[in-house]
Image (spheres, helix red, strand yellow):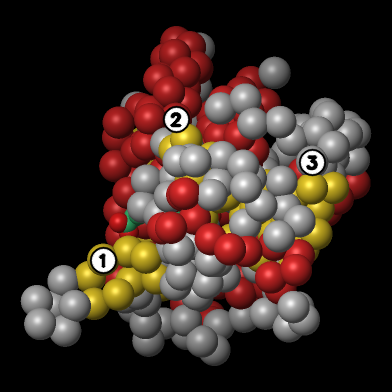
Amino acid sequence: MTATTLDGVATAAAVKEELRERIAALKARGIRPGLGTLLVGDDPGSQSYVAGKHRDCAEVGIESIRVDLPATASEEDVMAAIIALNTNPDVTGYIIQLPLPRGIDENAMLELMDPDKDADGLHPTNLGRLVLGVGGEITSPLPCTPAGIVEMLQRYDVPISGKHVVVVGRGLTVGRPLGLLLTRKGLDATVTLTHSRTANLESYVRRADILVAAVGVAGLIKPEWVKPGAAVLDVGITRVVNEETGKARLVGDVDPAVGEVAGHLSPVPGGVGPMTRAMLLKNVVDAAERVDS
Ligand SMILES: Nc1nc2c(c(=O)[nH]1)N[C@@H](CN(C=O)c1ccc(C(=O)N[C@@H](CCC(=O)O)C(=O)O)cc1)CN2
């Protein structure tokens, strides 16, 4: 069997096309959505993701404002930048690019955001709404990667209801919120959330109808671990630098040979990453429409 590719680039392009119309309608009513990004430090991955977010905004007609602080910034500097974004009228939504440099309390910084301007769904109030909203209508932003995973599965008609989803990784941006989202009424998956201390990880992975790997351990998931026909979504990104050329390439958590066993495969690059960015744009547009209504 060769897996059907879950193409994140094409799916994100379709989402962006739909958003362009909604943005034009907002602008016609005098509403101008604006995204802010706060980046602290010089991590190459984070720099590239933030640059991509601004390119996406320009592509669909959303204004964007970039705030970059050096790796030497203090917690007080970061707090001042957050407070400025909270009060900037041109910024209708913003994100704090994670991870923050060591020594800066990530949770405290997220908590300082205005929850109504949280474009990432990572403020405690919005995560709390995700917990409380079992079965309810979604009226707050969803974390972008989990939302992108669900959007992609649905657009490729991969059944979710009643399926066993195994998530490898319990991080704030993917594993934890994904478990909450997939178990909501209407999606109705059964979720097993595994992590670095899970004993005999392989035995859980083998039982997955849908597998999401988000730990950042290159090639961790082997083809013999995967149930034939399963949908496999690779979220882990490791930058491997070729010592001779100095060039970096991206490697996922899933061994490429899994494509011979899985029914669907979302690769790295070109899978969930572009969907994460598309869902950020959607959160900005959703929020602008909520203000309007
Ligand atoms: N505040 C946030 N921080 C982080 C999040 C997040 O959702 N909010 N998620 C990740 C990083 N991330 C978005 O910020 C992200 C990761 C990957 C991609 C992406 O497009 N990946 C491409 C490859 C891009 C490259 O060449 O480097 C792909 O997989 O095809 C976009 C966004 C952690 N931090």
Callout 1 amino acid: Arg
Residue at 79%, 41% in the rendered image? 163
In the depicted structure, whether residue 188 falls above or below residue 106: above
Callout 3 amino acid: Lys
- Per the model, the C-alpha gap separating discs 2 and 1 is 23 Å
Drawn side of residue 20 relative to residue 107, left or right: left
**Quadrant containing ligand 1:** bottom left
Residue at 76%, 56% in the rendered image? 207
Task: Say whether marks 2 and 3 touch (CB < 8 Å).
Answer: no
How far across and down, in percent of the image, does residue 293 sit?
70, 18
How far across and down, in percent of the image, does residue 150 sit?
64, 38
Identify the mark at residue 163; answer none if there is no mark: 3
How far across and down, in percent of the image, does residue 33 sit?
47, 31
Which image quadrant is residue 199 in?
Answer: bottom right
Identify the mark at residue 11; answer none if there is no mark: 2
Residue at 36%, 52% in the rendered image? 269
Q: Earlier in the sequence, mark 2 or mark 1?
A: 2
In the depicted structure, whether residue 235 falls above or below residue 246: above
Residue 32 visible in this rendered orientation of the protein: no
Q: Earlier in the sequence, mark 1 or mark 3?
A: 3
Q: Earlier in the sequence, mark 2 or mark 3?
A: 2
Residue at 16%, 84% in the rendered image? 243
Identify the mark at residue 249; answer none if there is no mark: 1
In the depicted structure, whether residue 293 falls above or below residue 95: above
- Mark 3 surroundings within 10 Å by alpha-carbon count, few (fewer than 14), some (14 through 19), many (20 or more): some
Callout 2 amino acid: Thr
